Image (spheres, rainbow, N blue to C red):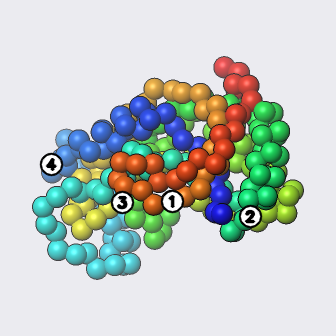
Amino acid sequence: MRLFAVVVPPRGVIDHVTQLAAGVQPEWEPAAAPGEPGRHAAASSRLFSRRREQVAAPARSTGPMLDLLPAAHIHLPIAKLGGNIPLAEAARVTTALQAQAAEWESPRLNLQGGLALEPKGDDSVWVRLRGDLDALKAVARGVSRVSQGLNLYVDRRAFRPELRLGTINGRTTEAYLETLLTALDDYESPSWWQTTLLLIIPGEAGPDQVPYKVYSEIPLGPAVPH
């Protein structure tokens, strides 16, 4: 089986930020002081110029300016554990993670701020995680340490402290992207305690269905002191 470690924020938090993104309309004439670009104008122009170097922009048509991911598909990848591993290996790593994760602090997190088209070659818009990021990164390191201790290959390249909201398309404009990133900068979600880590098996699913099966839900340890 293909086994992945992921963090899934509360569904209400994900629903709220996706609804925010879905409601954004481009400010064709951003309200900026004379001679001053908007907060993201220079960055979005630079990023779109970079994108044009990679692919030819298709003709625009009517429709959404961002291909939003369904809320059920949004989660934070931590690591891929092994390749196609047998059930016995999956059970072994689950038991080891359950024992160790009780010592890893539960981080208090929230969402605020946005990022788009970075690093080079990426075509996505992301919302940033804020809060106890050191504790979150410690969880990711712990997953790797435990798994590698069992001689499992661990791929952590997908881990980054952001949630992928969607991808740009042929209708995406610089004005829209600037407005969206400004809205995400001004947004702050409610905070939550991330008290579990999931081990999942990916699978096919419809747009409103969770695209994986939960193999194991692993409790984390005490909350980070605040």
Residue at 28% x, 56% y: name it. Answer: 66
Q: Observer-nearest residue: 152 or 39?
A: 152
Name the residue tied to disc 4: 29
- Give SS at disc 4: loop
Q: Estimate the x, y position of residue 196 in percent, counting from the top left.
A: 64, 35
146 with respect to 68 (left or right): right
Q: Amino acid at mark 1?
A: Gly
- Disc number at residue 86? 2
**First in sequence: mark 4 vs mark 3:** 4
Judged left or right of residue 32, residue 141 is right
Q: Nearer the viewer, mark 3 or mark 2?
A: 2
Q: Earlier in the sequence, mark 1 or mark 4?
A: 4
120 up-or-down from 208: above or below: below
Label 1 element class:
loop
Q: CA distance from mark 2 to mark 1?
A: 17 Å
Asked whether residue 137 is in view, the answer is: no
In primary-sequence order, the first of circles 3 and 2 is: 2
| Residue linked to disc 1 | 203
The residue that appears at 71% across and 21% down in the rendered structure is 225
